Image (spheres, rainbow, N blue to C red):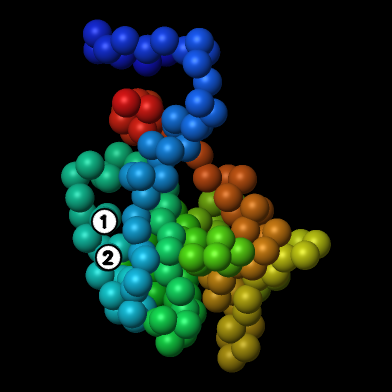
Amino acid sequence: EIDMEGKFLLPGLVDAHIHAYMLGESRSNLDLSNCKSVLELSKRLSSYNSLEENAKKTWIIGGGWDHELMGCLPTRHDLDSVVSDRPVFLWRACMHIGVANTKALDMCGISHTNPPSINDGSFDMIEETNTISGIIRENAVQYIFSNVTESSKEVKKKMIL
């Protein structure tokens, strides 16, 4: 149950089918469009993480990065150096690839050395260490994203209003 604080909500009479919660959620996510480097991505992640309005979010979700603009793929280690105490998942602009930090991988039960086999999906590995890089492709993205849930009622309310 959500206290609407006196605001009027009229459900179901005209359904524009906009998925109000998803719209609110996407507008509150970290925007990584036009990042020119992993350093810039890290700075934006750090700024986003430090904002009081984002402090209660269970997950940090963002997107829009493009490794072709940045010169390389970000890794979980890049994200961990900025945020290690809560899960982070960042979509690439195409939404077929994402990068997760170690906390996100651990919360989803993904082994760092033996990730699950996913049909039409994959977890990139770092050859030198034989450990997961944090880059997740195609259907493997849904393996992570199915675990992304916002537990804060306050955050959910803000996304709807």
Q: Out of 109 and 142, give the one closest to the viewer.
A: 142
Q: Is residue 79 visible?
A: yes
Q: Is residue 83 visible?
A: no
Query: Residue at left 21%, top 54%?
Result: 50
* Rendering quarter of residue 123: bottom right
* Rendering quarter of residue 79: bottom left
- Disc 2 secondary structure class: helix
x, y percent for residue 12: 52, 13
Residue at mark 1: 48
x, y percent for residue 111: 64, 64
Left or right side of 51 for 120: right
Crowd rating for badge 1 (residues with CA inside 10 Å; few <14, some 14–19, many 20+): some
x, y percent for residue 39: 30, 79
Query: Residue at left 33%, top 80%?
Result: 36
Amino acid type of the residue that numbered disc 2 sits on in the rendered structure: Arg
Residue at mark 2: 44
